[in-house]
Amino acid sequence: MLHAPMPEEFHLAILVSGTINWPLEDDSMKEEALANHNPDMESRRRFLRKFLSVPAVGITLNSLMEASHSKEVPQPPQNQSRWQIGCYTRPWDQYEYLFALDAIAKAGYEHVGLMTTKSFNGLIISHETTLETAHQIGEECHQRGLNPLSAYGGDIPVAASLEAGIEGLKRIIESCAAARVKNLMLGGVTDEKLHAPYYKAISECCDFASEKGIGLSIKPHGGTNSTGPQCRQIIELVNNPNFRLWYDPANILYYSDGQIDPVEDAPSVDGLVVGMSVKDYHHPKEVLLTPGTGQVDFLNVMKKLVSGGFRSGPLIVECLKVGEPETILEEARKALRFTESLTGQLG
């Protein structure tokens, strides 16, 4: 559901009478009403969307109390409950991750994906991350009103040994749990010699991740996991319900040199998708663009995925048009509007 922009004078105030009314003419009342919602942490747009999503001119405290005792809990608008729209840190990976979190919150998102950043290994979370650091990462997200739905943890050291790969993956899972991330997205391998030990390590960690409340997923990412059918084979090989697919329509085009249309590929992953990177593609080999400006037919991709069972879940913007921080911020806002419009067309 899309929410029309609210006029500037619309502010939230809880009056002594027990009724929420607007507009407020008294600036001191406006400041008091917003005092507990730090404008540095979340934009007014996000604040209003979160608390004023139901069109009304007044809400009494009595009606709220009655609702709290009712067996029928009021439900949020359908598309808000079905889809969690977020943004990965990747568009800001030339900066430290706090800069990315600030921008994502300022752009109006309520969900975030932890991916690449300016750090010693180019990642926010990896098998080298300490639990203390991971916990602080989660706190930084929470302070900005961001829910970390996904993380990319980079490679696991399976090239050293299977045991090292298992231990490395468990460390990433523990860090995701400490940061309150919901799903760990894995990139697979390009070296066919590592295919068997890599997915054996994942198989050994699926139940461990489930106990920590973390889902595991593979994405189309080149090598032996470039297409939907290849990803299906891998998921069937691991054979654990806690290992599923994070779809990436742009990568279907990228790794097939534009030959495979994700609209045609999507049915091959029916019943497997738990999330999607909202990422576009322009031939040849360009993904650093804002969703909706490239060749991916997002609406028909989503219709195929919904038909195949992906009827709710995370939709996280991965890439944006490159530029200066102000440009990236505006592109992030465009991507949010685009994805909201996309979900609004799914019915």
Image (tube, grey):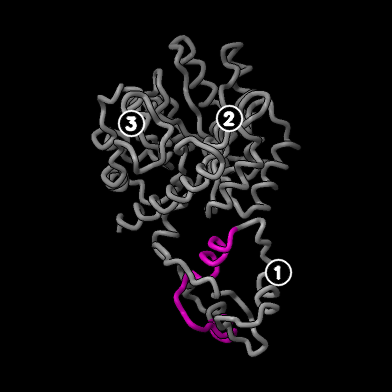
Residue 75, image x, y percentages:
45, 68
Residue 17, image x, y percentages:
64, 90
For label 3, the residue is 282
Instruction: Indicate the quadrant where residue 239 lies.
Output: top left
Q: For marks 3 and 2, give the CA distance.
A: 26 Å
Mark 1 closeness class: few <14, some 14–19, many ≥20 residues within 10 Å: few
Would you say 71 lies left or right of 130 here? left
For label 2, the residue is 153
> Which contiguous range is marked in magenta?
43-66
Q: For marks 2 and 1, give the CA distance.
A: 37 Å
Would you say 113 lies left or right of 341 here? right
Q: What kind of residue is marked 3?
A: His
Pick the residue in front: 175 or 93. Answer: 93
Residue 339, image x, y percentages:
39, 50
Pick the residue in front: 334 or 249. Answer: 334
Q: Quadrant of the N terminus?
A: bottom left
Q: Which mark identifies residue 35?
A: 1
Pick the residue in front: 341 or 235. Answer: 341
Mark 2 closeness class: few <14, some 14–19, many ≥20 residues within 10 Å: many
Q: Quadrant of the C terminus?
A: bottom left
Image height check: is 332 above or below 234? below
Q: What kind of residue is marked 1?
A: Ala
Mark 3 closeness class: few <14, some 14–19, many ≥20 residues within 10 Å: some
